[in-house]
Image (cartoon, helix red, strand yellow):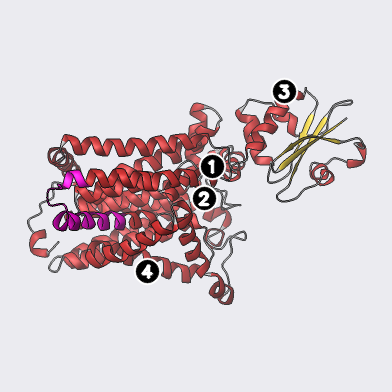
């Protein structure tokens, strides 16, 4: 947008602009386009809902058992392990308090956040580009393997993507309107994202770098005022984040957030050797969730779209600079899911490339192929190309522990009061969670059996465990159970019993 054109934009305030945008969006969208958007979102929701049935994962179980069961005052001040994604854990606590303890209740906050990312990102792309690129991009986002994989995880990544996409949409409004309320909402959204997990800082910094670049590209005469408001937003973001994290800062200090002993800052030599592993992990995620040729074409499309669109270049530049700057500052090996927000921008580049490819085909090969028809066909093709392998990948890459449910069933069916089932990390939290969700007395998992009572011992294979080791970990003497024998042999877990 040029500065001359920007002068014609008159903001009606945040709510006024919102009402005007909704009315304008409805007026300019044909019934067919609305139906296509609804269909694509529905497909995305169905795929994510189907994934709700996958077994409980270790991190989900520990989120509930170790943190969501704590009082709120303790929950927001406990960062003994980075698995406490504080805001997500609070929402899990609320969800389980309202609907009871269960797997879908733990996953509900993340599921809703992941679903909302689809319409929000559609609106952002439509505002930045056009309805056709937005529809094509929505088809990819709805069926993206990496986004589907995290869609039902009861941990904080889904909330992070929601706040990132929300910040993009709010940022678009701020760039156009210079509205203070938008600036404050951007600060709030990113502060909440950071409250989920400190590693959201990469996405938050990318948002502010993008805002700065976009303002410099769009304005000349009013640039100083707009940049000052952006800086104000950045300051408020930092202030809000410090307020949210103040209980942890008071209890455990700042270093607990940025240099946790379980996820420490590396020295320069080790970081230099390992930092490229994060890029390879991101590439592997893209390849494994689709196919090599699809990812290769996507990379070509990314380069073409970046060459074609200055708006996309600004987003890519912001992501790159934030990743490099904070990566060098923090010097940590981040999990691949930390970079999941980048897939929204990568999928946008695919939407731009496909749009211009279809335009080229219409001009050179199919002169009667209208925009609506070719966009609809492309969206359906992309739905299949990404959806089929994306869903399969999401199912395969779910590190759930179905054996925990089987163990809980065993307790329910075979044990009587006074009997015990002994488990050891990492099986303790999943078994505790599944027994709670089945309303099984937790006394079965603690203490010593009554005289003449039966014990069962769950022995994991990864990492390899032993009957004696599990018993000792639970304060029991293995010598008291000489006749212990194997009764179940499941994949990854064996059950022994005595007498």
Which quadrant: the N terminus?
A: bottom left
Disc 1 + disc 2, Cβ < 8 Å: yes
- Label for residue 247? 2
Disc 3 + disc 1, Cβ < 8 Å: no
Q: Which residue is mark 1?
A: 73
Q: Nearer the viewer, mark 3 or mark 4?
A: 3
- Label for residue 158? none
Q: Is any part of residue 159 visible from this angle?
A: yes
Image spot of residue 40 (x, y percent): 31, 39
Task: Name which residue lies at 31% across and 52% down.
Answer: 167
Q: Which residue is mark 4?
A: 321
The magenta stretch is: 348-374
SS at circle 4:
helix
**Going from the N terminus, do you reach mark 3 or mark 2 first?**
2
Q: Nearer the viewer, mark 3 or mark 2?
A: 3
SS at circle 1:
helix
| Direction from residue 14 to residue 344 in the image, left or right | right
> Badge 4: few (under 14), some or many (20 or more) residues near its Cα, within 10 Å?
some
Question: Would residue 360 be counted in the magenta stretch?
Answer: yes
Disc 3 + disc 4, Cβ < 8 Å: no
> Badge 3: few (under 14), some or many (20 or more) residues near its Cα, within 10 Å?
few
* Residue 170 or residue 234, whichever sits in front: 170
- Outermost front residue: 365
Q: Which residue is mark 3?
A: 413
Q: CA distance from mark 1 to mark 2?
A: 8 Å
Image spot of residue 393 (x, y percent): 49, 47
Task: Name which residue lies at 26% across and 66% down.
Answer: 213
């Amino acid at each position: 947008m040029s500065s001359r054109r920007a002068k014609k934009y008159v903001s009606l305030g945040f709510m006024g602009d919102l009402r005007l945008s909704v009315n304008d969006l409805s007026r300019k969208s044909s019934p067919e386009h609305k139906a296509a958007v609804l269909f694509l979102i529905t497909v995305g929701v169905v795929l994510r809902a189907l994934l709700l049935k996958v077994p409980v994962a270790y991190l989900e179980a520990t989120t509930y058992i170790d943190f969501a069961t704590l009082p709120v005052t303790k929950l927001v001040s406990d960062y003994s392990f980075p698995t406490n994604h504080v805001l997500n854990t609070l929402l899990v606590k609320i969800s389980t308090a309202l609907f009871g303890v269960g797997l879908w209740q733990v996953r509900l906050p993340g599921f809703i956040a992941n679903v909302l990312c689809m319409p929000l990102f559609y609106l952002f792309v439509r505002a930045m580009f056009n309805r056709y690129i937005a529809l094509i991009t929505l088809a990819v986002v709805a069926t993206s393997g990496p986004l589907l994989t995290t869609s039902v995880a009861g941990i904080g990544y889904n909330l992070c993507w929601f706040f990132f996409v929300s910040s993009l949409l709010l940022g678009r409004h701020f760039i156009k309107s210079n509205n203070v309320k938008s600036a404050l909402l951007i600060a709030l959204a990113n502060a909440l994202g950071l409250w989920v997990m400190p590693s959201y800082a990469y996405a938050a910094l990318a948002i502010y770098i993008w805002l700065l670049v976009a303002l410099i590209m769009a304005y000349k005469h009013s640039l100083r005022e707009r940049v000052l408001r952006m800086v104000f937003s950045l300051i408020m973001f930092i202030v809000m984040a410090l307020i949210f994290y103040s209980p942890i800062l008071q209890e455990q200090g700042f270093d607990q957030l940025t240099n946790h002993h379980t996820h420490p800052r590396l020295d320069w030599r080790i970081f230099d050797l390992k930092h490229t592993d994060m890029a390879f992990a991101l590439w592997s995620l893209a390849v494994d969730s689709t196919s090599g040729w699809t990812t290769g074409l996507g990379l070509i499309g990314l380069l073409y779209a970046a060459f074609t669109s200055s708006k996309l270049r600004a987003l890519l530049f912001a992501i790159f600079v934030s990743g490099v700057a904070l990566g060098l500052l923090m010097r940590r090996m981040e999990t691949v899911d930390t970079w999941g927000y980048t897939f929204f921008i990568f999928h946008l580049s695919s939407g731009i490339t496909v749009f211009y490819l279809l335009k080229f085909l219409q001009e050179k090969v199919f002169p009667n192929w209208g925009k609506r028809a070719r966009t609809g066909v492309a969206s359906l093709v992309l739905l299949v190309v990404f959806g089929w392998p994306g869903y399969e990948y999401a199912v395969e890459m779910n590190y759930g522990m179905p054996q925990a449910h089987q163990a809980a069933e065993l307790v329910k069916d075979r044990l009587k009061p006074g009997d015990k089932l002994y488990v050891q990390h990492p099986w303790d939290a999943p078994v505790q969670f599944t027994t709670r969700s089945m309303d099984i007395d937790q006394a079965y998992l603690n203490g010593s059996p009554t005289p003449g009572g039966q014990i069962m011992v769950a022995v994991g294979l990864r990492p390899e465990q032993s009957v004696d080791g599990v018993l000792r970990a639970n304060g029991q003497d293995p010598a008291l159970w000489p006749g212990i024998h194997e009764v179940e042999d499941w994949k990854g877990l064996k059950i022994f019993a005595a007498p």
